[in-house]
Image (tube, rainbow, N blue to C red):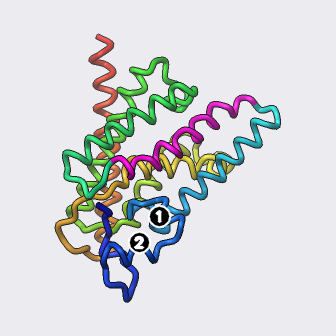
Amino acid sequence: MVVVDSASAPLGSSGTVDSTISSRTHLGRLLSYPEWSSTPGKVSFLWCLLNLGFFVVLWLSGEHGAGGVLVEIAAWVPISLAVPRLVRGPFSAVSYSAIVFLLALVEETLAYSTGGGLHGAATSLGEDWLRAVPTFVGLGVGLFASVRATGLLAPEAFAAAAASGIVIEIGLGTGFNPIAFLALGGAASWVYGTILALPIERNKPPLSAWIRVSVTVALLAVGALVGGLVGIALECVFRL
């Protein structure tokens, strides 16, 4: 089953699955979830590929410290592109949360294995999981709640997830260092977008744009905060 977001269907189209697929570009067909094939998703994916190319050049020039980042990005791109071929939406609250949890586990395992867990500060894979995965789940709950409450559109969902990745990884991790933003912003936005911006069952028409944006920002902030606190609590419990 292919999921089509009717709110972002091309003007003048019949809205059928076949007509929508035939009108999509090759990149749109590759990024088969509506969220990923939207303009924010395509920009994020292409930016991620540019980041990958940058680290390839950096590594080939002798900067072997770039190897970990290179491996992480190079591994995540095919993993993420395989996800829509393995699981189809739209997803309910339970299935969405389960997929976010599993994808976060995979990504954090990959990050820790390449030396990037918790911005390089993780001392064990368990610590990485306990601190990072609840944050992803918290963000996911916030995004899911916004989609269901406000009718957040597919492009907006990906943009919100991608922005969360840039804020957390580039903002909190580097203080919005401009070089880090250019070199890693695409990878951060693609990772978070592909983990969080999944097709979600919509049960109401979209509310006004300012309500969608305001509610989404608030719910993502609360979700990240609660998830982070849960992660800290779990780490304390398992250290006892």
In the foreground, 139 or 153: 153
Q: Residue furthest left?
A: 203
Under tag 1, what secondary structure?
Answer: helix
Query: Which residue lies under the disc numbered 2?
Result: 21
Q: Give the Cα separation between the discs numbered 2 and 1.
A: 7 Å
Whether pointer 2 and pointer 1 mark residues with C-beta atoms closer than 8 Å, the reply is: yes
In the foreground, 159 or 8: 8
| Span highlighted in magenta in the image | 64-86
Relative horizontal placement of residue 186, taking residue 161 as reference (left or right): right
What residue is rendered at 82% in x and 37% in y?
61
What residue is rendered at 33% in x and 21% in y?
235
Tell me which amino acid carries mark 1: Arg
Under tag 2, what secondary structure?
Answer: helix
Residue 71 part of the magenta segment: yes
Relative horizontal placement of residue 111, taking residue 100 as reference (left or right): right
Give x and y (percent) for residue 211: 29, 70
Query: Which residue lies under the disc numbered 1?
Result: 29
What residue is rendered at 59% in x and 41% in y?
74
Residue 172 part of the magenta segment: no
Tell me which amino acid carries mark 2: Ile
Relative horizontal placement of residue 60, taking residue 48 as reference (left or right): right
Can residue 233 be seen in the rendering of this structure?
yes
Q: Earlier in the sequence, mark 2 or mark 1?
A: 2
